[in-house]
Image (cartoon, grey):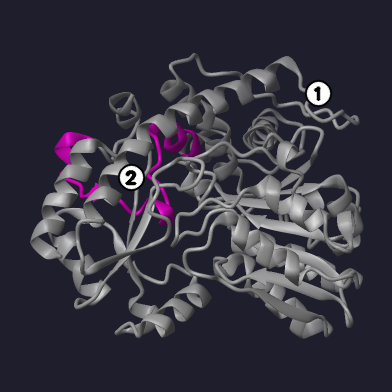
Amino acid sequence: MCDTARAQFAYFDPASGNLAFMENAGGSQVPTCVADAVRDHLLYNCAQLGAGYAVSNRSDAAVVGAHEVVRALFNAHGAGEVALGACTSQLFAAVADAYRRVGAIGPGDEIIVQEACHEANASPWVRLAADTGATLVWWRFREGPAAESALADLAQLLTPRTRLVAAVHVSNILGAVLDAAQLVQTVRGGPRGARTRVALDGVAFAPHLPVDVAAWGVDWYAVSLYKICGPHMAALFGTHTAFAEVAEGGPNHYFVHASAVPYKWELGGPSHEACAGVAALPRYLAAVAGEEAPPVPVEHKRAPQAAGALGVQQQRLRATIEAAFARFVLMEQPLQEKLLAYLATKPQVTVIGPPTAQPGERVPVVSFRHSTQRSADIAKKLQERGFALRNGHNYAHRLLTRLAEAGAWAGGAEDGVVRVSLLHYNTPGEVAALIDAMEAVL
C-alpha cells in the first residue's frame, strides 16, 4: 500500500535525494494528480466565474467540484454547509468576527477555550471576548489525564452563560484524540444545552482519521486541506443553525445575501486553481484505496436534504474517502508504535502526549523533550542526518508556555519540542533510519 501511495508523489522519486519527510503536521506533500490539476487550471481554464462561456464554465465546475469533495470529506450532506478559505486561522477568525458583528455574544456571556488549541482556534475567541466584554474561560491542560477526566473538567466549566466552546480534535503537539461525539454530548448536557456552540479544530485529526460531522453533531469544524495532500486551502463546516444565527455577519460584500452560503463566507471567492486541486484529490484517495477514481459531482442541488441523503455520486465519493482512510490507519499505526516504543527506552526523553499508539486515541504526531539537550539542537542534528522535521511551539504557544514553565525548559516555548509528524506515505524503513539517527543524537 505504501509503495502505491508514494508512487503518486514526485517528492518521493528515489532519484530526488529528498529528505525523509516527517513534518507532515505542518503540511503534507502533494500528489502529482493534484499538482497537475492546479497547473492545468492556470494554463487552460483560468477565467472568472459565472460568465457563461466555455472557459468560465470550466472554472465554475472546479469550484463546485471542490465544495462537493469537501462535503464528502466532512460527511456534511444534510448536516450543514461548507465554505473554503486560505487557512483555518482565517476561517475561524471570520466566524468569531461574525458573532461580534451580529451581537450574538456580549457582556455577561462566557466563551470557553481549550488551552491545548492551536492558535487558529484560540486567538479569534480571545479577541472576541476582549472586544465584546464577554468572559473568557480557559479549559486548562492537565498533563496525563484520561479523556474522561478532561471532559469532566470541561463539564465543571459550563454555566448558563456559556455561549461557545472552542476545542481541538487532535493537538498538533500531543497527538491525542479528543472524542468529538463525547465533547458535544458533554456540552449539550450543560446548563445551556443545544444553545451552546462547539467550534472544533480538526486540522491535526483530518489527515489521519475520517471526519464525520454528521455523526458528531459539532456546530463548527475546520480543516487545512494542505495537510491532507491538497493545495494550500482550508475548509469550514457549519450546521445550518450555526450559519443562520450569524448569517448577517458573513465577511463577503454587502450585496451578497446573508442566505447565500457558502458565498457569503468566501470573501472575494476561493482560489480557483486551488479548487481544481481539491477536486482532483479523490483520484489520489482512490489510488490508495485500490479503486477507480469516483466522479466528482459538479452540480450541487440546494434543495433540503435529510442527513445522509446522498446522491449516487456523493455516496461513491464518500465510500472512496472512507476506504482510503481505513488504509491510512493500517499504514500509520505500526509507524508510531515503533517510534513510541523506541523513545520509551530513553530515560532522558519525555514524550509529550499519550504513550499509546492506538489509532482512536492517538495519531502519529510525536513530540518530545530531552532533559539535557535543547530541542533546536536535536532537530538540527536530525535534519543534517536526512530527516525533515522541526522543533518549536508549532502555534500551540499557550500549551507549550504552560509545559515549559512547569518543566523549567531551557529555551521555553520557543525552543519547544522536537516534533516528528508522520503520514501514511512514510515507510517502516524511514522510521527505522530515524531511530538509528536518534541513537547517535539522543
Q: Nearer the viewer, residue 180 or 221?
A: 180
Give the residue pinned by disc 1. Answer: 309
SS class, disc 2 = helix
Going by the numbered disc 1, the residue's amino acid type is Ala
* Residue under label 2: 336
Q: Badge 1, how many Cα within 10 Å: few under 14, some, many 20+? A: few
Q: Nearer the viewer, residue 265 or 355?
A: 355
User: Against 259, is 38 above or below?
Assistant: above
On screen, residue 237 versus residue 390, left or right, reads right
Which amino acid, mark 2? Answer: Gln
> From where the camera sits, is residue 269 visible?
no
Bin the neighbour count of mark 2 within 10 Å (Cα to Cα): few under 14, some 14-19, many 20 and up: many
Q: Where is residue 375, by image quadrant?
A: bottom left
Query: What span is colored magenta in the figure?
Result: 13-38
- Which of marks 1 and 2 precedes in the sequence? 1
Q: Which quarter of the rendered picture does the N terminus lie within? A: top left
In the image, residue 384 lies at what x, y percent? 13, 61
Extreme residue in the left direction = 440
Callout 1: helix, strand or loop?
A: loop
Question: Whole-percent x and y of residue 387?
Answer: 21, 54
Percent across and percent down for residue 306 are 87, 28
Above/below status of 330 relative to 42: above
Q: How many marks?
A: 2
